[in-house]
Amino acid sequence: RRSSDTVHRTLQNVPLEDAPEPTGDHAAKDIRTTLRNTLKLGGSMVLTIVIGFGVRLALRRYLGPTVIGPLNFADALTSMCFIFLGLGVDTYVRTVVPVDPKAANRFVGAFVVVRTLLAIAIFIGLALFLSLTDQPADVQVLVYVYGLAAYFQSLNTTFAAILHSTRTIDGLSILSVINKVLWAAGFVGTMIFGLPIVGIPISILATQLVALIVSYYLAKKHAGFEFSFNFDQIKPVFIASL
């Protein structure tokens, strides 16, 4: 906690002399809260991993190598391209928000715009790549849907970082499980009803969109998050995030 305070004050050019030392009771409360949150998040993570692992095994057995190949290609390609949308901002959020809960209001809105512009540039690059490599139309659709899901996921992780930093994770852990169940339902429904294979990335896109709406609501409710577009914050935050 002291380390986070030092980093934040250094970035903001605030003197360190007035930084309060945590009391014994406050430190013990922090430890209890951290342990509870760790157990909640850990439990939801284990459950989502079990669900995801089982569904993916069933999916591969049902689809076979001929169909699963293009699906894996689209998933891997978009994951590789859209990983750059993170920009290191989520780590910066976890550094400054525990010290100043309103800090995210000053720069997250601007970075949503930056990520949107980067996503558009990535989609244009993907379109050129898919065209030059003569990928079939159904594979191109898979790539674009997976790409949209990756874009929404990049925004979700930021709101999740805000909630983690304010130690408000009850709704987030429940949302994680619900989303994985909806994701699994989309996969199973696609297999059982013989729907087009694009139904699988669509189910991922739908869960990410739901997660974005709910996580934004939770960040607004518990962390007081409000969008503001201070583009003068982009450069210092980006440098700190690097």
Image: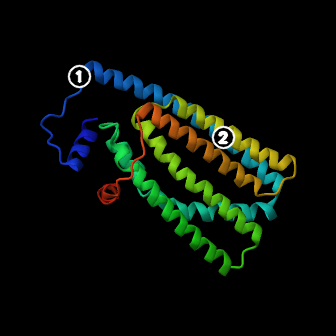
Q: Amino acid at mark 2?
A: Lys
Residue 200 percent location from the top left of the image: 74, 52
The first of marks 2 and 1 along the sequence is 1
Structural crowding at the residue carrying mark 2, measured as other residues with C-alpha within 10 Å and reported as few (<14), some (14–19) or many (≥20): many
The residue positioned 46% from the left and 25% from the top of the image is 36
**Vertical position of residue 137 compared to residue 86: above or below:** below
Residue 166 percent location from the top left of the image: 40, 33
The residue positioned 56% from the left and 50% from the top of the image is 153
Structural crowding at the residue carrying mark 1, measured as other residues with C-alpha within 10 Å and reported as few (<14), some (14–19) or many (≥20): few
**Mark 1, residue position:** 23
Colour convention: rainbow
Q: Residue furthest right?
A: 193
Quadrant in which the C terminus appears = bottom left
The residue positioned 58% from the left and 72% from the top of the image is 124
Report helix, strand or loop for mark 1. loop
The residue positioned 44% from the left and 42% from the top of the image is 161
**Mark 2, residue position:** 180
Q: Residue furthest left?
A: 17
Q: Amino acid at mark 1?
A: Thr
Report helix, strand or loop for mark 2. helix
Would you say 40 lies left or right of 103 here? right
**Vertical position of residue 140 compared to residue 186: above or below:** below
Quadrant in which the N terminus appears = top left
Residue 100 percent location from the top left of the image: 30, 38
100 or 32, nearer to the observer: 100
Q: Residue furthest bottom?
A: 132
Residue 65 percent location from the top left of the image: 79, 62
Would you say 154 lies left or right of 240 here? right
Q: Is residue 152 something that shows in the picture?
A: yes
